[in-house]
Amino acid sequence: MKPRLQDAIRRRSLLADGAMGTQLMLAGLEQGSCGEAWNLAQPERVLAIQRRYVEAGSECLLTNTFGASRIMLNRHGHAGQAAEINRAGVEIARRAFDGRAGYIIGDMGPFGGLMEPWGEFTAAQVREAFREQARALVEAGADAIIIETQTALEELAIGIAAAREAGAACVIGSMAYDVTLDGSTFRTMMGVDPEQAARFIADAGGDIVALNCGTGMDMERARAAVERYRAVTALPVMAQPNAGQPKLVNMRVCYDETPEQMARGVEPLLAAGVNILGACCGSTPEHIRAFRKEMDEYCAAGRRPGEFEHENQTL
Ligand SMILES: [Zn+2]
C-alpha cells in the first residue's frame, strides 16, 4: 500500500507541480473561458501539461479542477457537468503519472463569491457545491484534496468538512496571503494571518497546512510563512509560491521570476522544513525542473533523512 501523503512527506519532502492556469493559456485557452471544461473537451492538452510536470520531476499533481465547483462552473454553463469534470481531472492526472509513483491531489479553489450576509450565496449552497466536488474527486481516486487559494476561514471550514465527509485520505488547507502595503508582514485579503490559519486548519481536521499564490509572496516570503506555520503547528507544511509578479507584456500576463531565480529559494525553504514544495501562477515545467535539481542536491547532501519508497509502484 502506498503511504498516505501526510505520512510519506514526514520521511522525505516531495515536489509538487507548477501552474496550470497560465499553462492552459499557453496551450490556447482564451482568457476568461473555462479551463476545467478542457478535462472533457481537450483532455490531451491538459494531459500534455501534466506530463511535462511529471517529466520535470513532480511527485504530486494537482488536478485541473481549481474552478470545478458547481458554482464556478455555472458561470460558463457547465454546472451540470461538475462531477464529470472532476472525475476526468483525476483520470488525466493518473494518466500523466503513467504508472510512476506519485500522488494525485484533487484541487478545490474558492467558490468565487461572497457568502451571506456580504454576498448572495448561502453557506448551504457553498457546502453543497464543495461536497459534490470533493465526492467526485475522492470517488475517482484522488489521494488527497487541497482547498486552496483561501482567504476566509468560513469558506475554508466548509471545504475541509466537505473533503472529510467525502472520505479524503488527506486534506490540505492552503491560504493565499498578500504582503501588506508597508511590506512588514502578510495576511489574507480577509485579514487572516499564518498563525491563525494554521491553528484553524488543525482544529478543523486538516492534515497539512499550506500556502499558495497571493500577492508579493515570493520564495523568501513563503519561507517565512513556513516558519510561522511550524512555530504553531506540528502538521506538515506545503508551499506553492507564484513565479514572482504578474506583468502585462504584449497583452499577455507574464510572471517575472525565472526558474534560476526561484530555485535559489528552494534550499532555504527545505531548511525551514517545507514538506511539499510546488509553485503557483506563472511557474512552468522549467521552474519545477530547477526545483527538482535543488531538492535532489539537498537530499544527496544528507540534510534530510530517509528515502521514501512505494511498495506498490502502480497507482
Ligand atoms: Zn496562483
Image (cartoon, rainbow, N blue to C red):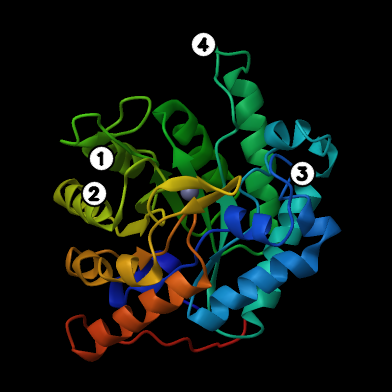
Residue positioned 65% across, 43% down in the render: 67
Which residue sits at x=61%, y=17%?
Answer: 122
Spatial CA span between label 3 and label 4? 26 Å
Q: Check contact, mark 2 vs mark 1: CB within 8 A.
A: yes
Pointer 1 or 4: first along the chain = 4
Q: Nearer the viewer, mark 3 or mark 4?
A: 4
The CB of the residue at mark 1 lies under 8 Å from ligand 1: no
Percent from the top left, x then y, of residue 80? 84, 38
Q: Does the beta carbon at disc 3 come under 8 Å from ligand 1? A: no
Instruction: Looking at the image, tell me whether mark 3 or mark 2 is earlier in sequence order.
Output: 3
Disc 1 residue type (three-letter): Pro
Check disc 2 and give the amino acid type.
Ala
Question: Which residue carries the number 1 mark?
Answer: 194
Q: Would residue 185 be seen by someone viewing this image from the given angle?
A: yes
Circles 1 and 4: CB distance less than 8 Å?
no
Q: Earlier in the sequence, mark 2 or mark 1?
A: 1
Q: Which mark is residue 225?
A: 2
Residue at (25% x, 70% y) in the render: 264
Q: Amino acid at mark 4?
A: Trp
Give the percent coordinates (x, y) of residue 88.
76, 60
